[in-house]
Amino acid sequence: MSGSFVRIPPDSTGKKIATSERLELSFDNLTGTFSIGDIIVGATSNASGILTAIIMNQGSSLAGELYLKNSTGTFIDNEPLQVSTVTIALANIAVSTPATLTNTQLVVISDPNNPENQQKIDAFGATVNTFTDGSPVFSPFGGLINASLTTIADYKFSYDANNDKFYDNVSGAGATVTHIANESSVKLSIGTVSGEISQRTSHLYHPYSPGTGNIVLQSVILGDTGKTNVRRRWGIFDDNNGCFWEVNGTTLNVVVRSSTTGSPVDEIVAQSNFNIDTLSGFDQESFILDVSKSQVYWIEFQWLGTGIVKFGIYNNEGFKLAVHRFEHANFLTVPYSRTATLPIRYEQENLGTSGSTSEMKIISASVKSEGPINYTFKDQSVIVPRKSVPDTSNEVPLVSFRPRTSVNTVINRIISFFSSLNLTNISTQTATIRIRKNVTTLTAASWADHSSTSALQVDTSSTAFSGGEIIWANQVINGGELTQNFNIKNINDGDDLKLMLNADGTTQPIYSITVQTPDSGSSNVLAIINWKELLL
């Protein structure tokens, strides 16, 4: 920092008051654009300085004042002022407006009782304001966050590993995914052989609502502080897009992944280059991160095709610390990621032979929106022809649904919800109706896309099924009618009524509506099934 000092009495030869020095340089005949940080050079005098501020003269678009730090030499009147040898303006150093050095006193605000407690300023010149319970929390779009966050999905492992919500990709003799009941966590393990991987991805691709920011919270513990040939990752991402934390060997990174070029490309920033806080004990709250201890990591992001992605942690005092910000607006000519609707994922992989087995514990996670989400649904409906169901102890599929693997050549991540069904029993027998999820097999099924843009395929031909968990049941008396509405308003409603492609991109869960005639004779049932498809 360029600067000087002023000695103060009575110790005029001892104590000093720090100042910051600037050269005020007038200019006119502006023909280009100055930017903060430019090195300004006088083409004739070879004097120079780093631009810290620019003020235009009132009523003029061609003349003003430049404020330079670290200035050297003496600028002369009317010489070209250049940036990288390009003339931007001319010096205007008349006798009445000479280039002058000024010194501004640097003031430290401190507690009178404990001078060690001092006001902090961040790298952008803003005061760091906190409360006893922590720092104010701002959304990715700059709004002060209060209790109005909307939860998109929560994940916890108090009783089981939530296997129905995740796809586990495990490869290698030492690779496992294990529920640890007494720790309410799930442990990902790998052995020492190159190529072993243990990966867990949520089936749910968490919807992004334009104009709001999403916030991802994950509590993670690594089994060590990092080791050669082992890479760990956690965040909101898949094979093609997203943002995540990474420990590669012993290096902590933050990463933004994009497939806008047609294949995935990772933008990686190492801990030593974090632009807000390196978590090495020298920045902001003097916090030193230990990845082998329990930590709450967070990621906030805008999208709309552009915007910021911010990474941070909560420190041991519960303060929310930002550590790095990726900035995309005014830099890129394409979206920074193809989509912001993504799953949460955890993974560890051996990139070569490792010195010992490795583990990662995942404790809990939450994906939230900075405010209320206005979901947009597309209503779909199918009319099921009359089906005669004889007196039998077996249920018969009336109609079955499964997600398509792709829609318009894009992997299908649309979420569908059953919204209502209407059944009419035109026989003299009572009919029992059930909805079963995750049906294993269907006999003589004939699948067809419901429409070219619908997310689901429909089957009305199957004659038998196996497997499947009952999630709803009712009866329709002889000659009666049953109408059931499932009040689906947002993604958190009716978890069992969600139908979506598994995270692997190929597994198609099957939901079947079945009919059974418990009395003698046959029942004849007609049905109309309605569902909603969440537009992503």
Image (tube, rainbow, N blue to C red):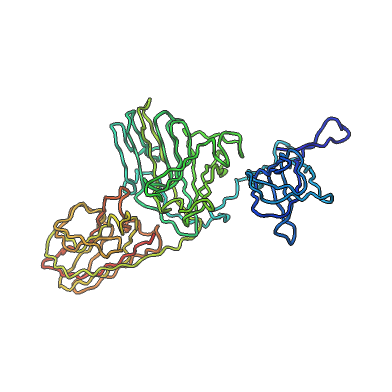
The residue sitting at the top extreme is 355
Q: Is residue 315 left or right of residue 409?
A: right
Q: Nearer the viewer, residue 98 or 471?
A: 98
Q: How many marks?
A: 0
If the image is split into quadrants, where does the C terminus sit? bottom left
Q: Is residue 336 visible?
A: yes
Depicted 403 relative to depicted 178: above or below = below
Left or right of residue 423: residue 95: right
Judge whether residue 131 can be spotted in this image. Answer: no
As rendered, which of 210 and 286 lies closer to the eye?
210
Viewer-proximal residue, 470 or 217? Answer: 217
Residue 177 is left or right of residue 517, and the answer is right
Tell me the quarter of the image containing the N terminus: top right
Residue 191 on image: x %, y %: 33, 30
Q: Is residue 162 above or below residue 371?
A: above
Q: Position of residue 285 (x, y in %)?
A: 61, 39
Horizontal side of 164 relative to 320 (left or right) equals left
Residue furthest right in the image: 10
Q: Position of residue 50 (x, y in %)?
A: 68, 42
Is residue 310 shown above or below 360? Answer: below
Going 54% across and 46% down the picture, which residue do you hit? 325
Residue at position x 64%, y 53% in the image: 32
Q: Residue placed at 41% from the left, 44% from the top?
A: 265
Residue 48's x, y, as percent? 70, 41
Out of 474 and 41, give the one closest to the viewer.
41
